[in-house]
Image (cartoon, rainbow, N blue to C red):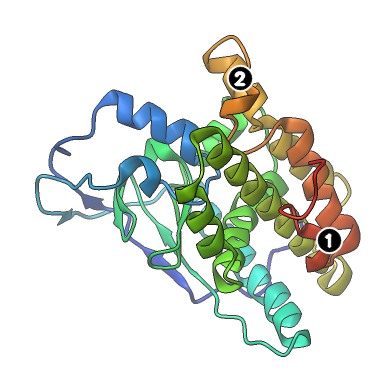
Amino acid sequence: MRWEGRRTSQNVEDRRGVRFGRAGGIGLGTIVLALVAAYFGVDPSVVMQGVQPSQQAEQVPYQESPEEAQLRKFVSFVLADTEDAWGAIFSAAGQTYQPPTLVLFSGAVESACGFAQAAVGPFYCPGDRNVYIDLSFYQDLQSRFGAPGDFAQAYVVAHEVGHHVQTLLGISERNMAARQRASEEEANALSVRQELQADCFAGIWAHNADRSRQVLESGDVEEGLNAAAAIGDDRLQKQTRGYVSPESFTHGSSEQRVRWFKRGFETGAVDSCDAFATRNL
C-alpha cells in the first residue's frame, strides 16, 4: 500500500500500558467463546456481558518497539483513509459522517461493551462507538491465519469501521432487536448477514481508496481476499473442532466473506451491500 507520508488520524486513543488486576469471572471457556464470537466481530459483549475486572486499572510505562511504532502509524493512516472514504460517501448522500475512535490496547481493555482480553481479537463496540485492537493480533493474522501483508492488516480495521457505519445507519440496532426475538440458529444467521455486510463495506473503502487516492498496489486486493478467507467460520471451525457446523456460523464461510468483500470493492456502492435483502449469501 502507498501510505508513507499520507495523513494519519487524530481519532486514535493509546491505552497501551494500562494493566488490570486478576479478572474475576473470566475463565478460559469465556475467552475461547469470545475468540470464536468476536474475531473480526461486531460486539464481544454478547459473550462478555456482565464480566468486570476485580481490581482497578493501573497505568504503567509502555515502551513500544520500532515494529509497533510502524504498526501504530499504519493503522492511524488506515483509519484516516476510512474517514476520507466514508466522509465522501455520507456527504454525497446529504449526511455527515461521524468517525469512530480507534483504541490501542495491550493485554486487556474496558469498553462500554464490558471487559475484554486480547484473546477476543479486534472488535467494535457500538456502546461507545470505538474500534479496539491489540496490535499483537497482527502476529496471529500472519502466523496463525496465514494472512500476511499490509492490506490484510488494513482489512481488519476497515471491517470494524464497517460495523461503525452499520451503527450510524441504524442497521446494528435493528439487527440486534431482531436477534433478541429469534431462535439461536436464526440469531446466528442474522449475525452472519451483519458480518458479511461489514466485509462488503470494507470492500467499499478499498474501492474508494483505490479510485480516489491511488492507495493500492499490485497484490493488495489479493491480500485482503486471503485475510477474508482465512477467518471464515468454516475454516476456523475446521481448525478448532475438526468439523464444520454451518448452523452455528456467526460470521460466514470463507467463500462468502471473500464474495462480499469483492462485491463492495467492485461496485463501491452501499446499496450493493444489503446482505439482509438477499436469499443467497
Please report the residue visible at 48 percent of the width from the left and 74 percent of the height from the top: 11
Query: In which quadrant of the rendered view does residue 23 lie?
Result: top left
Which quadrant: the C terminus?
Answer: top right
Res. 2 visible in picture: no
Mark 1: amino acid: Ser
Mark 2: amino acid: Ser
Q: Dot 1 surroundings within 10 Å: few (below 14), some, or many (20 or more)?
A: some
Which secondary structure, mark 2?
A: loop
Which secondary structure, mark 1?
A: helix
Q: Which mark is residue 272?
A: 1
Q: Give whichever of 178, 256 is nearer the camera.
A: 178
Instruction: Choose the circle earlier in sequence order: 1 or 2.
Output: 2
Q: Is residue 232 left or right of residue 163?
A: right
Which residue, given by chain and number where applicable, does mark 2 sit on?
A: 245
Please report the residue visible at 45 percent of the width from the left and 67 percent of the height from the top: 129
- Distance, label 1 to label 2, CA atoms, is 28 Å
Q: Dot 2 surroundings within 10 Å: few (below 14), some, or many (20 or more)?
A: few
Number of numbered discs visible in the structure rendering: 2
Measured as percent of width and height from the top left, residue 71 is found at 54, 53
Q: Give whichever of 86, 29 is nearer the camera.
A: 29
Q: Is residue 269 left or right of residue 66?
A: right
Q: Give whichever of 223, 93 is nearer the camera.
A: 93
Q: Residue furthest bottom?
A: 94
Query: In which quadrant of the rendered view does residue 54 lie?
Result: top left
Q: Residue furthest top?
A: 242
Measured as percent of width and height from the top left, residue 20 is found at 18, 47
Please report the residue visible at 39 percent of the width from the left and 45 percent of the height from the top: 46
| Callout 1 touching callout 2 (CB < 8 Å) | no
Which quadrant: the N terminus?
Answer: bottom right
Res. 121 visible in picture: yes
Measured as percent of width and height from the top left, residue 127 is found at 38, 65
Q: Is residue 146 left or right of residue 271?
A: left
